[in-house]
Image (cartoon, grey):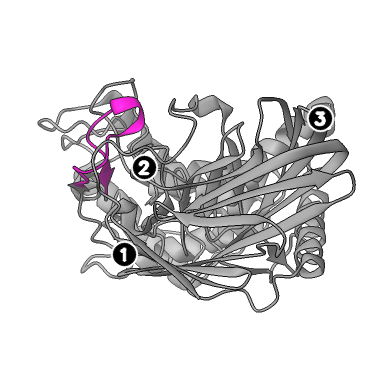
Amino acid sequence: MNTLQGSLLAPGRRMTPFPDYPPIESLGLIGNRHTCALVDRNGSIVWCCLPHLDSPSVFASLLDRARGGHWRLGPASDATTERGYIRASSVLDTVFKAKGGVLRLRDFLPIRHGRGIEISRSFHSIMRIIRCEEGETDVTMEWAPRSSYGRDDVTLIQRGSVVEARSQSGSVWLSGLPEDADVRLKGAAVHLHACMSAGESLHFVSSWGEPLADAGPKAVEDYLSDTVDWWDGWAASCHVDPDAEAWRDMILRSGMVLKLLTNERSGAIAAAPTTSLPEEIGGVRNWDYRFCWVRDASLITQALVTLGRKEDGIAFLRFLESAAAQHRDPARVQVLYGLNGERNVPEYNLGHLDGYRDSRPVRIGNAAALQRQLDVYGELLQAAYDLLLIGHELSPEQWSWLRGVADYVCQTWQLKDRGIWEVRGPERHFTYSKLMCWVALDRSLRIAQRLGWSEGTGT
């Protein structure tokens, strides 16, 4: 057994040969409705929270190249890169044309069963397959997990082909180290160097909590096949308007991104998979968006319903009804909730992280949860109305709750709020907020008419 312990907060220590931050638009997104990861063009996972999207990060070099943690896998030499996705899936396919040979890297978070229709089963693991397709070339890997946003010290313990990164927050595991490769534990990271020839493959799995029971090459290939099948089933279940058929691939790709933001456990829909990416480089408007905003989630629901995915809209409406039930008056819906319906998501700064390209502060949590934003009621009732139009029957409890929301809008529409821009200054009157209050009342009346409700009967 090989053991190594390292401090993670040593100032100025660089853990990667790629010191420049990748352009945000160049990052590839993978996920499985439990969490997501971002992969740069060099084959480095620069952002991932485990076991869930709203958990603390394990890889966060996107927010601090020295302290955040990363998992780099790719050619040892300079290479040109081509990237895409396998069919309609979220499996990222990267081809490196390097000195001496061609490598193909496939990154994914596994999903099994359901073929895009519930019930599915996702895993708290990242899987990576690298294959030499032509010639012979050297491959390097650097696995440097940093739990709890890089705050925890890590101890690496190697047991054969498996390494445990143990910290105060829990353990992250790496499986798949080949016996004949040059593997070293140094600087609280696993370093691997191997020479690969055409037809050879390496299969790696990084798991939260405990190593995956079966992480051998055949099992990983089966997970890959199952994951692609699941996404193929999801794409087949989507409806694209015949007038938009020419853009089908782009529509399904956009739908895939939205689907990745849905939460398999609760039905919540996150606004984004990241925190603290700046509105402008070097600026301070860097917010944590790994929460369920009523506004954003309602708009995403409308998009998914348009794709024929009413199940996501129904799950979100149930989530929000359950989350709102925590309030003394359920009609007073919060601006945002945690992905399990949490009301309290306190905001604070992580001062030990540099931020993306020195854009500070890095924040987790979001104080906007305490704001009044009157437009959210319009988006909520619009989403409910859209579900009704495609045949979803509102339960008596849901209709009672939505009526209460409409009554609350009647009481509050003339108040000042913080608006869609979530201003951190004094409340003001916003035209958009007033307009969406009108939408809330208009859609509630339309829902009432379709349900045969009348004021005289109160039903």
| Mark 1 vs mark 2: in front | 2
Residue range of the region highlighted in magenta in the rendering: 349-364
Seen at 67% across and 61% down, the residue is 110
- Residue on which the image places disc 1: 342
Q: Secondary structure at mark 1?
A: loop
Q: Tell me the kind of residue under disc 1.
A: Glu
Of discs 2 and 3, which sits in the foreground?
3
Mark nearer the N terminus (1 vs 3): 3
Circle number at residue 100 = 3
**Around disc 3, counting alpha carbons within 10 Å, would you say few (fewer than 14), some (14 to 19), or many (20 or more)?**
few
* Viewport quadrant of the C terminus: bottom left
Position in image of residue 257 (x %, y %):
61, 42
* Labels 1 and 2: the sequence-earlier one: 2
**1 vs 3, front mark:** 3
Q: Amino acid at mark 3?
A: Gly
Q: Main secondary structure of the magenta part?
A: loop
- The Cα atoms of the two marked residues, 1 and 3, are separated by 53 Å
- Residue 293, image x and y in percent? 38, 47
Disc 1 to disc 2: CB gap under 8 Å: no
Neighbour tally class for label 2: few under 14, some 14-19, many 20 plus, Cα within 10 Å: many
Quadrant of residue 12 in the image? Answer: top left
Taking the spot 24% from the left edge, 26% from the top edge, the residue there is 430
Q: Is residue 326 visible?
A: yes
Q: Amino acid at mark 2?
A: Thr
Query: What's the mark number on residue 275?
Result: 2
> Which image quadrant for residue 333?
bottom left
